[in-house]
């Protein structure tokens, strides 16, 4: 079992074509791939009663309740929800770094999702953010030069970003972490 996986999608990400219909909260609980699990479906699909259903399904399994924000326009909505943490696509735009600051100030953990894949400039990411090593994307770029300057600056965590049952692992991300000498931060260590 891996210690922590907080970036996982389920069938509540209704408009995300990569999610398979079998990728339910219940299936993830049955697989039990991580000691501490958090679900982070796309916030744009969690409006109205969908959020209530999502929240109940996640809590019923004893999972942590998160959401992923792709569009900076959804940040205020995401801040209005009782989420334990947030996962953010921080594009290389002023408004995204500002939104990241606002979310950090909310006091709940903010995970900077796959920064290499969305062009995040880590020199502009506010202190206190957690930077992700994402199993789905990390191998696509020069992770060694991207992450090496920032190893002392940020805390890091590993994520599967699973959209399908067989993505429920962090094998490649953890290989990168070992190569870089990264020690992961466990956000909800009281669970252990
Ligand atoms: Zn993402
Ligand atoms: Zn994601």
Image: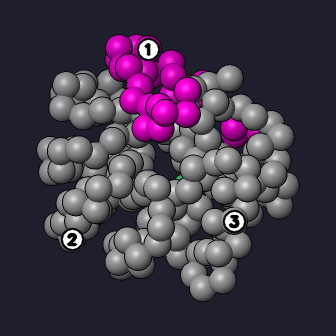
Of label 3 and label 1, which has the lower sequence position?
3
Of label 2 and label 3, which has the lower sequence position?
3
CA distance separating discs 1 and 2: 33 Å
CA distance separating discs 3 and 1: 36 Å
Pointers 1 and 2 in contact (CB under 8 A)? no
Pointers 3 and 1 in contact (CB under 8 A)? no
Q: Is residue 137 magenta?
A: no
Residue position marked by numbered label 3 in the rendering: 56
Q: Residues within 10 Å of mark 3 (few under 14, many from 20)?
A: few
Q: Is residue 42 above or below residue 127?
A: below
Q: What segment carries the magenta color?
A: 166-192
Q: Nearer the viewer, residue 37 or 19?
A: 37
Would residue 42 be found to the left or right of residue 11 on screen? left
Q: How far from the left and from the top, in percent, is residue 20? A: 79, 57
User: Is the residue at mark 2 in contact range of ligand 1, meaning its CB lies under 8 Å from it?
Assistant: no
Which residue: 75% across, 34% down?
Answer: 32
Residue position marked by numbered label 2 in the rendering: 95
The colouring scheme, among rainbow, by chain, secondary structure or one colour, is: one colour
SS for dot 2? helix
């Amino acid at each position: 079992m891996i210690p922590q996986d907080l970036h996982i999608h389920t069938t509540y990400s209704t408009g995300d074509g990569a999610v398979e219909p079998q990728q339910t909260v219940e299936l993830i609980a049955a697989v039990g791939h991580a000691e501490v699990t958090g679900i982070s479906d796309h916030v744009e699909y969690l409006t109205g009663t969908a959020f209530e259903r999502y929240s109940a399904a996640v809590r019923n399994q004893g999972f942590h309740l998160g959401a992923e924000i792709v569009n900076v326009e959804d940040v205020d909505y995401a801040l209005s929800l009782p989420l334990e943490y947030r996962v953010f696509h921080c594009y290389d735009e002023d408004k995204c770094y500002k939104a990241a600051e606002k979310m950090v100030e909310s006091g709940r953990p903010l995970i900077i999702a796959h920064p290499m894949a969305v062009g995040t400039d880590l020199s502009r990411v506010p202190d206190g953010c957690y930077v992700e090593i994402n199993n789905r994307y990390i191998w696509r770029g020069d992770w060694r030069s991207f992450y090496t300057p920032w190893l002392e600056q940020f805390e890091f965590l590993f994520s599967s970003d699973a959209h399908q049952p067989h993505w429920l692992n962090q094998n490649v991300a953890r290989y990168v972490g070992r190569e870089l000498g990264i020690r992961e931060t466990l956000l909800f260590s009281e669970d252990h």
